[in-house]
Amino acid sequence: MSQSLLDAVVESAEAHATVRIRPASASDVESLSIYFTSLSATSRNKRFMGARADIAVVAAECVARTSHPGHFTLLAEIRQEGQGTIIGETRYAYDAAARHGDFAISVADGFQRQGVGLQMMTAMERRASDLGHEMIAAETARANAEMRGLAKKAGFEDTGLGDWQSVHLAKRLSRVRGLPQI
Ligand SMILES: CC(C)(COP(=O)(O)OP(=O)(O)OC[C@H]1O[C@@H](n2cnc3c(N)ncnc32)[C@H](O)[C@@H]1OP(=O)(O)O)[C@@H](O)C(=O)NCCC(=O)NCCS
């Protein structure tokens, strides 16, 4: 699939700028590292389900995995005055044994609650479906209201397999062939 076919464009009312969702590439490692570092401690801890000191390593992993079939990272990037800044990311990995994809997602604190997360989820689902994957699963902290809200809005359901700390969510992907991609 050509990368440009995956791009989606959403309008950020607050920033009056265009947000583009695109696959990450090797040249994004440094910007991704800066993005992770710029997240508030709360958002970063939620994204990684705990503190991570090795942010540069995490960023490199996100991009390295993109050469692995069934793994990809999507970036939400805002362009202002010709300059691109990452404001969100989602990392997807297919678990062949479990026969479902897993993902993690974050949006920059200043851009949350503007629809960027949902747009990235939609783009991720479309790409996973194109790879022939039929199910996406996710685990999040029971206390993470924003992730639970986002997943619910995206059509994920609670599998009931979580515990007092975590919620397990899943969504079956419906493959719609022949529709043009955004
Ligand atoms: C979870 C996260 C990615 C959501 O991204 P976002 O861009 O703010 O989400 P959206 O604006 O697309 O919101 C879509 C829906 O999610 C739900 N939602 C988002 N933020 C919410 C919040 N703070 N409380 C309750 N529901 C929320 C709402 O249903 C919302 O739709 P609405 O605005 O029409 O009510 C973002 O909050 C984030 O980066 N959190 C920190 C990292 C994290 O927790 N990642 C998940 C674990 S990997």
Image (cartoon, helix red, strand yellow):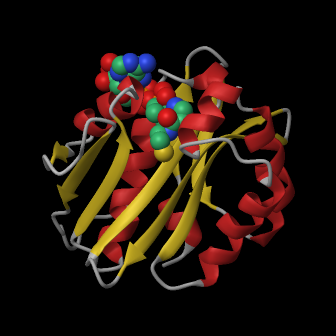
**Residue at far front of view:** 164
* Residue 74 can be seen in this image: yes
Question: Where does residue 84 sit, x and y in percent of width and height?
Answer: 79, 43
Q: Residue 83 occupies which quadrant of the picture?
A: top right
What residue appears at the point 58 percent right and 46 percent down from the top-left corner? Answer: 48
Residue 141 drawn at (x, y percent): 39, 37
Q: Quadrant of ligand 1?
A: top left
Q: Is residue 170 above or below residue 82?
A: below
Quick check: 136 left or right of 117?
left
Residue depicted at x 48% and y 79%: 1
Quadrant (top left/top right/bottom left/bottom right) for the C terminus: bottom left
Q: Is residue 61 above or below residue 18?
A: below
Q: Position of residue 101 (x, y in %)?
A: 35, 68
Q: Is residue 122 left or right of residue 14?
A: left
Foreground pick, 180 / 74: 74
In which quadrant of the rendered view does residue 98 lie? bottom left
Quarter of image, res 26: bottom right
x and y percentages locating residue 75 in the rendered image:
62, 51
Q: Is residue 85 visible?
A: no
Q: Residue at x 25, y 49 (%)?
A: 168
Depth order, front residue of 180/172 = 172
Q: Residue at x 38, y 26 (%)?
A: 143
Q: Nearer the viewer, residue 157 or 2?
A: 157
Q: Observer-nearest residue: 47 or 1?
A: 47
